[in-house]
Amino acid sequence: MVGFLLNRFGQTLMTLLVMSVLVFSGVYLVGNPIDLLLGSHATPAERDAIIQAFGLDKPLWQQYSLFVIHALQGDLGNSYIFNQPALHLILQRMPATLELALVAFVVALIVGIPLGIVAGMRPDGWMSRSIMTFSILGFSLPTFWIGMMMIMLFSVKLGWLPASGRGATVEIAGVPVSLMTLDGWQHLLLPAFNLALFKISLIIRLTRAGVQECLQQDYVRFARAKGLSESRILLVHVLKNTLIPLITVIGLELGSLIAFAVVTETIYAWPGMGKLIIDSIAVLDRPVILAYLMMTVVMFSLINLLVDVLYALCDPRIRLGGR
């Protein structure tokens, strides 16, 4: 296990290095933030002063070297717009994004796995066909369109739920949490379900395929021949073996929920990292964009590591870092 962890740590460092080169080059070669910050009425002296203050007068390789040196010290640069450390801005918005992503993830599991089991146990029934139709709609309909339709129905027409914002929060260890208040839950339900809808459809299909595959295996036939009940066969033999490949996909999807909640956060004005990165891209706030992308790489690497460990725990045949 120790060898496996060290190997993955080395892979994470290499991934961060490669991504830093790609992201830095891509971000710093597109557009000019000075034009957006100063406008067309700035004097040449003002432009030169801002360019020197931001270090944009140096060659690209030198700017990257300074970025790496400062990043190793925990400094990812200051935001051009907010004049605050970019990492601090990201960490301020991270609790809201993590809260939204985790609630959406739990909703996707609670809804998707049972529906997938039902669809897999009786694939030719009307309920299975209805569930698969729902999953097709979840895949096909655009997230932004569903989000707007949900706002129109539940907020504008019915007035049941608020359309934007995070609502009231309670600080736990200095971190604001919406889950501890009724108003926070009301603000959280719509964006969480909107973010979870695509994942629900994916989990339904994966679970259904896994259940159908397991039902055709010899160990299931043998269990039925021994007279075991269908519920015991489902829980002990089918579900456990279905979850093994599902864990890998679910882990990656959790990472995508955290990293790519941009559309949902924008539609519902959710004050998370996604909303921040959209605002930063609009004004070419390069340090914030870099900090967000590097944090995303780190989160994906940690989630992949956790998935590998869970995979080994669920399947005793798999050993990490050993024979």
Image (spheres, rainbow, N blue to C red):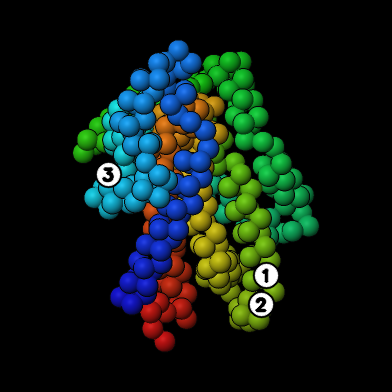
Q: Amino acid at mark 2?
A: Gln
Mark 3 element type: loop
Total numbered badges shown on the rendered structure: 3
The residue indicated by pointer 3 is 75
Query: Quick one: quadrant of the C terminus?
Result: bottom left
Residue type at tag 1: Glu
User: Quick one: SS at disc 1?
Assistant: helix
Spatial CA distance of label 1 from label 3 is: 50 Å
Location of residue 234 (image quadrant): bottom right
Residue 97 at least partly seen: no
Q: Residue at x 61, y 67 (%)?
A: 230
The x and y percentages for residue 88 are: 29, 37
Kindly report which numbered mark, 3 or 2, lies closer to the viewer in this rendering. Answer: 3
In the rendered structure, the answer to whether residue 306 lies left or right of residue 111 reads: left
Which residue of the protein is positioned furthest toward the top in this rendering?
Answer: 41
The residue that label 2 is drawn on is: 217
Judged from this view, the residue extending furthest toward the bottom is: 323
- Sequence order check: which comes first, mark 1 or mark 3? 3
Q: Position of residue 288 (x, y in %)?
A: 39, 36
Residue position marked by numbered label 1 in the rendering: 213
User: What's the residue at 76%, 50% (across, down)?
Assistant: 129
Rendered view: 28 above or below 202: above
- Can residue 42 be seen here? yes
Measured Cα–Cα span from mark 1 to mark 2: 7 Å
Q: Position of residue 98 (x, y in %)?
A: 40, 42
User: Which one is in front, 232 or 166?
Assistant: 166
